[in-house]
Image (tube, rainbow, N blue to C red):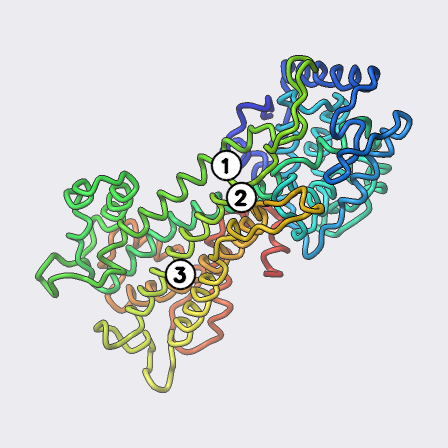
Amino acid sequence: MIELTGHTLTIEQLKRILLDNEKVSISEKSMEEVHDSRCAVEQIVANRETVYGINTGFGKFSDVIINQKDVENLQLNLIRSHACGIGEPFPEIVSRAMMVLRLNALLKGFSGVRGVLVELLAELINKRIHPVIPQQGSLGASGDLAPLAHLALVLIGEGKVYGESGNVIDSASVFSEKGIRPITLQAKEGLALINGTQAMVAMGIVNYIEAEQLAFDSEWIAAMTMEGLEGIVDAFHPAIHEARGYPQQIDVAKRMRGWLDGSKLITRQGEKRVQDAYSLRCIPQVHGASWQALDYVKEKLEIEMNAATDNPLIFDEGEVVISGGNFHGQPIAFAMDFLKIAVAELANISERRTERLVNPQLNDLPAFLSSEPGLQSGAMIMQYAAASLVSENKTLAHPASVDSIPSSANQEDHVSMGTTASRHAGMMIQNARRVLAIECICSLQAAEYQGVENLSPKLKKKWEKMRHVVPSITEDRVFSEDIEKLNQTLHPLYHNNNFLKKEISIK
């Protein structure tokens, strides 16, 4: 069980909650801070002080004072009116991550919610009751208002949740079946639930987990391509990369040397050619740059996972209540846009390596890796498919963070579009993994032509494992099925999450 404190959650811990079904607990100290913060809110209400979101309207209505008898209705109306998300729902794993992140933020003790609310969130997480949350509708400032409102609906016994078989059911029926009592929101609690960046961060963390594995897989797949093309290993000599100084570039070169150690297929400078094309020679430089972006993304996600993103925030036992803008998603919007670029480049260079594997003018292999060139087209159209995905990624890579648009009668006149950036990053990762799957299929076949016995020991094991997924190309067949099988094999979440399988098959 992972103890949540509001301050110490890491991506590795969240992975355990998401992939290994780890349960969560609430630290005693954090619960005390929640209690103290709640007492402050109740004192504000009792004293009839005017504080945004507690006894005022929201957004442009912040100057409208709400009668004390209407404070509970204010919070209920807020959740219902803001639950206007649209489009396909987030994958269930993202919904679970959103719940954990929202709980962790409330445990910082700056939000003024009751202990019963955070306890209910923890109970739903531990019983795997996950809200159905539409993906579209957030501007990524004032928080992920629409997505988080759909999360909050479930706490009051409304909205939809995922059933055990992946179907969608009413939360009220699940609560009745499992003996769970919904809560009635009190002063500040509705606003505390929906002011935050948890949709973009939850999607961002899932993106990061997938992109990290994608980057690692891109290296051994590239190494097998190197063997298939009898590439020059000198390009990975440590002196080259130490001379430039980027740690990530140095690490990629080291891992490439590890994958190729013992290979009888790689060549030395001048044996067959003086130097390789950039897509082979510059693997450490290009992949290393993507790793730099991934490291940046991880740093920002782990800060935001433990951030107070509510508004207003309550300090010094209610003596200081400040309206600010920590709900603005600009840091994560930038991070997701950087992630998009990093993933796009891993796919771009992969597709170029695929071209070198299938183009008879660029290698000594059978044209398009065909068993009967002319009669059998072989991998010809697989390269087309990779090129199509790469080009689609180029359009998705446009930075969402520069596309602000005003809302709430110009009160909220600059927004981050961070959730859009996070969603687009997720789409690009799916595209990029399929591009790598195509390169992998082609590199497996090239290795077969060059002699599997000549592969490095590590890559021979990879070849044998992948041949159980995708058989040798002895004649033309429906390669779409091979690409999808390999895509699922490379997916880091697919085998650990039954609720993901339906989502992937839809995509």
Q: Quadrant of the N terminus?
A: top right
**Number of disc labels:** 3
Which residue is label 3 attached to?
467
Amino acid type of the residue tagged 2 in the rendering: Gly
* Element type where label 3 sits in the image: helix
Image height check: is 396 above or below 141?
Answer: below
Furthest-left residue in this view: 270
Q: Quadrant of residue 191?
A: top right
Residue 93, given in percent of the width and then of the height, sits at: 61, 44
- Foreground residue among 261 and 363: 363
Which residue is label 2 attached to?
204
Which residue is label 1 attached to?
301
Distance of label 3 from label 2 (alpha carbons):
32 Å
Q: Is residue 93 visible?
A: no
Q: Do the residues labelled 2 and 1 touch (CB within 8 Å)?
A: yes
Q: Is residue 268 left or right of residue 177?
A: left
Furthest-right residue in this view: 69
Residue 70, given in percent of the width and then of the height, sits at: 89, 30
Image height check: is 481 above or below 123?
Answer: below
Residue 306, given in percent of the width and then of the height, sits at: 55, 28
Q: In which quarter of the image is residue 394?
A: bottom left
- Foreground residue among 351 and 296: 296
Q: Please give the name of the residue rendered at 41% of the width and 39% of the height, measured from the top-left corner.
A: 296
* Element type where label 2 sits in the image: helix
Distance of label 2 from label 1 (alpha carbons):
7 Å
Amino acid type of the residue tagged 1 in the rendering: Leu
Distance of label 3 from label 1 (alpha carbons):
37 Å
Q: Nearer the viewer, mark 3 or mark 1?
A: 1
Mark 3 vs mark 1: which is more N-terminal?
1
Q: Quadrant of the C terminus?
A: bottom right
* Element type where label 1 sits in the image: helix
